[in-house]
Structures are given as C-alpha cells and as structure tokens.
Image (cartoon, rainbow, N blue to C red):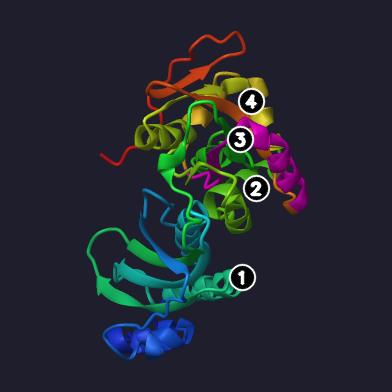
Amino acid sequence: MAGEGSGKPLGEFERIERFFAPLAGPGGLGLLDDAAIVDCRAGQHLVVTADAIVAGVHYLPDDPPDLVARKLLRVNLSDLAAMGARPLHYLLTTALPSALGEEWVGEFTRGLAEDQRRFGIDLLGGDSVATSGPAVLSLTAIGQVSAGMEVKRSGARAGDLVWVSGTIGDAFLGLAVLRGAYPQLAPEHRARLIERFRLPNPRLDLGGRLAGIAHAMIDISDGLIADLGHICKTSCVAAVVELASLPLSPAARVIVDGEPGVRTALAAGGDDYELLFTASAGLAKAIDDLSSAIDIPITRIGKIESGEGVRLVDAAGQTVPIDEPGYRHF
C-alpha cells in the first residue's frame, strides 16, 4: 500500500505543506491563511465554475493518479472555455480514503503541477478531509473574460447553425475499452480512446476566439444531445442534429463501421469536453477559417429552429430514437 514502510503517516497540515503548498500562487498566500486574495482587473469579469469527480463514477479507481488530477483540472477548464474565459486560479477539495497514501497524493499533485504549467493556472487553497467511501475530488476554477464578451447558453437563435469541435464519442468508447469491450481493436486505436477518456483537452484557445462569433456555447460533459438540450431550454429554441454529420475519430469509425448502431450511442455519450456552439449561418466561412488557423476541426452538425427540444435525424430526415440523451446523476 502506498505510504507503508515510510514511518508515521503525514497529518493533514503536514500533507498540505508537503504536497499542495508548492502549487500555490501568490494569491494563495502559501496556503497559510484561511482564505485567498484575488485581483480583478478593470473591464474584466471573473468566471467561476466547480466540478467534482468520484472514483468509480468519473474515473476508474486504478487510473493513474496524475491523470486523475489532470482530468479533474481539465473538466473545469473546459467550463471556462465554454464561456470564452482565460484560466487564472483554482481551489481544491479532496476527500480521500486512508488506502490512498502519500505515494498516491504525490503522484496526484505531480499531475496538477504539470497542467498548472501547461495552462497558466495556480492553486489558491481548498480543503482536505478523510472519507470511508470512494475518493471524491472537487475543484473550483476561476477565469477571466472581458466584460460583455462572455458566451452564455442563452443566446441561440432560430436560424443559427450548430457546430462542434473535435470528435464525438471517443471518451465513451474509451471507458468501454477499459471495461473490456472491443478487444479486437488495434492497440493504437485502443490507446487513443482510453487517452480521450482519461485526459480531456479543454478548448481554451478556441473558446476565447469564439467570443463575438458564437451566440451560445457549452462544453460536452453529459453528452452532445443532452448538452445541446441545455442550450435549447435556456434559449427557448429547438435543435435538429444530423446523425451522419457527427465527427468521428479514426478509432471510432472502425467501431461504427462494424456496429452502425453505435453511432447513435455516441451522440449521447459523455466526457467529450468539446465545445458545442451555435452561430449565424453567415459566419460559416469565419468559423472554417478559425478551424484552419488553430488546427482544430470544427464541424457543422445541425441547426436551431423555433420550438423546443433536440431531435436527432438520419440521412432521410427521419427522427432517430434515443433512450437517454446523455448521462444523468439522478
């Protein structure tokens, strides 16, 4: 067991001092005070988001702890990206069982340090508690956006086109692979799908560049259909999504070619953390140019209409039934 044979386990404050204090930025005050201090520049708004991940629900208990940490940070950064914000700081709360010893915590904080450098963000503080249940990790991210440039869920308009970045369904398939599915899949495809599940890529650069272009935007966490449904409900509109237009990775295409019915499941699969947005049809060229400029695929997958709800259609325009539009906690 991690931590065994290393003498008396570290107490709460010793653990914070050893593992977490080195991650703190100036506003975190060395994690020596009860609260942090955050500046907000004139003409800017702070954007704040929080997400939690639970062992056995959002990640597998034997996933590498450095990747667990990076996923935790990145799913929050994806929320900032969806509003066009740039990341600044974060707060972290960990509820860990005693079986996860100091070695696990050390690898966890190593992953945080790696992504702090990558994304230019630092730790302000948080809390550390013990639990007899599964590990629960909660992170609150703070970002910054120019006042008036925030992209919300509520701005979609009838006549808008619906766009999505990257590819859809890889994380859903990656979890299936980790649970033993698709053993015939080539090793490189298996590795790529698992990576997409364990390590999402928040589209921060794209999110910032879509400010002023996108009318409404959200990141895909619960599933494309479910998350587009959130935009539609908030904007009081409806949407039609073309099943055949959903962008698939080479690995996903191999699976769909063998099992065409899987494509529908990918429309409802979660954990993609791609950006899903609506924009005027007249901005199609600008969006294509942006896609080329930052080398991220952006695909038109449907349109916004008057009405309510989201309808998935096949090539003939017929509605494709979906049992569940996305992941539900309750």
Assign the C terminus to one quadrant of the image: top left
Q: Which residue is mark 2?
A: 191
Q: CA distance from mark 1 to mark 4?
A: 32 Å
Q: Which residue is mark 3?
A: 183
Q: Are marks 1 and 4 in contact (CB under 8 Å)?
A: no
Residue name at image x 42 percent, y 88 percent: 18
Residues in magenta, as a range: 271-293
129 left or right, relative to 225: left
Q: Which residue is mark 4?
A: 245
Tell me if residue 279 is in the magenta stretch.
yes
Q: CA distance from mark 2 to mark 1?
A: 22 Å
Task: Name the residue type under label 1.
Answer: Arg
Q: Earlier in the sequence, mark 2 or mark 4?
A: 2
Helix or strand or loop: what does disc 4 sit on? Answer: helix
Residue 97: % across, % down:
29, 67
Residue 196: % across, % down:
58, 48
As drawn, 250 above or below 88: above
Q: CA distance from mark 3 to mark 4?
A: 27 Å
Question: Of tags 2 and 4, which is closer to the observer?
Answer: 4
Question: Of tags 3 and 4, which is closer to the observer?
Answer: 4
Q: Are marks 2 and 3 in contact (CB under 8 Å)?
A: no
Helix or strand or loop: what does disc 1 sit on? Answer: helix
Task: Name the residue type under label 4.
Answer: Ser
Tell me the quarter of the picture where residue 214 sits: top right
Q: Which residue is mark 1?
A: 118
Q: Are marks 2 and 4 in contact (CB under 8 Å)?
A: no
Q: Earlier in the sequence, mark 3 or mark 1?
A: 1
Q: Is residue 8 visible?
A: no
Q: CA distance from mark 3 to mark 1?
A: 34 Å
